[in-house]
Image (cartoon, grey):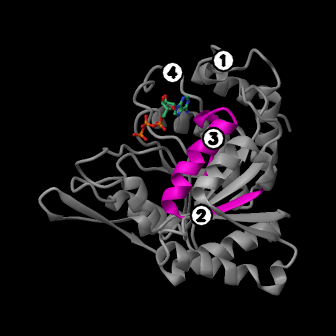
Amino acid sequence: MKKLTLIPGDGIGQEVVLGTKQIIDSLGLNIQWDIVTNPMNDKKRISEELEKSLSITKVGLKGPLTTPIGDGFRSINVEIRKRFELFANVRPIKTLQGFKTNYKDLDMIIIRENTEDLYAGKELEIAKGVTQSMKIVTTAASDRVAKFAFQYALENKRKKITVLHKANIMKLTDGLFLDRVRRISRRKIYKDIEYEELIIDNACMQLVMNPNRFDIILTGNLFGDIVSDLCAGLVGGLGAASGANLGSNYAVFEPVHGTAPDIAGKGIANPLATILSSIMMLNHIGMKDGAIKLNKAVLYTLSFPENRMRDMGGKLKTKDFINRIISNIKD
Ligand code: ATP
């Protein structure tokens, strides 16, 4: 029996995460869920409930948690990634049947450094009306995410890694990141993986003009955040953008999208991003057969034009979409 942490989260998280749980339960795998309803305590920090759960299970499926923009506490999502040293954020970008897109057959992976950069949260007001934000880049964090990316490429038979940076302006911080990635790229075992460097602004243009030229994208925390949404847009939006936060000891799987307050509670949120994240999770914990079965059911469901949700140009509700996937799970 495998015990996993489930964090339904806020907004549409409740709908898409609990729906995904229903699907996984119907697979008949030997999984027991530890449901964490309060991942955050009164001080807006990681709760004891979540600490305890993840310290036992090591692996979780998580919905989005509310992040106020501007004033208020810093993101709990970011804090979870830091606390559990989930240093590599892996976001597959793949064309799926049913989503309207301008491009065909996209298949790339974004690997985002998850623990530092401008997300270090070191902001201060140095004088009235003058604020400062500190970008932190270290050799250790750059090395570990670079090694992760090249190892990932090797194990998943990927051909090319493109590192996105702004080292022409941020010569020290992005310069260090680039230097460390470059060193790792020169290792003999990675000789068959093509290595490329692109300045972020140029990369954005190329992503829009010719996204098929990319295979694995490796970048820092802030560029990774922005480019992830851009790439989600290339394959039809946030509805299908899945993700994994991976570290040496823990792993938390979550969709790229946020709490979507504009559609929360309406029963129209697309659960696909969370379902695809859960497939990554099943693979991660070694339940490969379950992952294959669920993936087949998802692709089969998407092959019918009537199985389209609102963000795919259809009218299907979250619950109905989930039920159709469950009914398409075959042994
Ligand atoms: P947060 O502050 O939590 O990041 P947000 O609304 O700023 O929330 P997202 O939640 O990522 O950011 O939503 C951006 C847009 O994409 C919204 O219009 C939302 O309705 C839409 N969206 C996000 N996720 C989904 C989904 N799963 N299904 C359908 N539409 C979605």
Nearest to viewer (mark 1 / mark 2): 2
Point out the tag, 4 or 2, that comes first from the N-terminus. 2
| Position of 186 relative to 55 (above/below) | below
* Location of mark 3 (residue): 232
| Position of 251 relative to 300 (above/below) | below
| Position of 207 relative to 122 (above/below) | above
* CA distance for labels 4 and 2: 35 Å
Image coordinates for residue 149, horizontal then vertical, percent: 69, 69
Label ID, residue 219: 2
The three-letter code of the residue at mark 3 reads Ala
Classify mark 3: helix, strand or loop: helix
**Which quarter of the rendered picture does the N terminus lie within?**
bottom right
Classify mark 2: helix, strand or loop: strand
**Which quarter of the rendered picture does the C terminus lie within?**
top right
**Mark 1 nearby-residue class (10 Å; few <14, some 14–19, many ≥20):** few
Q: Is residue 190 magenta?
A: no
Label ID, residue 313: 1
Label ID, residue 267: 4
Q: Is residue 2 left or right of residue 16?
A: right
Query: Could you tell me if residue 113 is visible in this image?
Result: yes
Classify mark 1: helix, strand or loop: loop
Q: Disc 3 vs disc 4: Cβ atoms closer than 8 Å?
A: no
Q: Foreground: 110 or 18?
A: 110
Point out the tag, 2 or 3, that comes first from the N-terminus. 2
Image coordinates for residue 291, horizontal then vertical, percent: 76, 48
Q: Is residue 159 left or right of residue 3?
A: right
* CA distance for labels 1 and 2: 32 Å
Q: Is mark 3 within 8 Å of ligand 1?
A: no
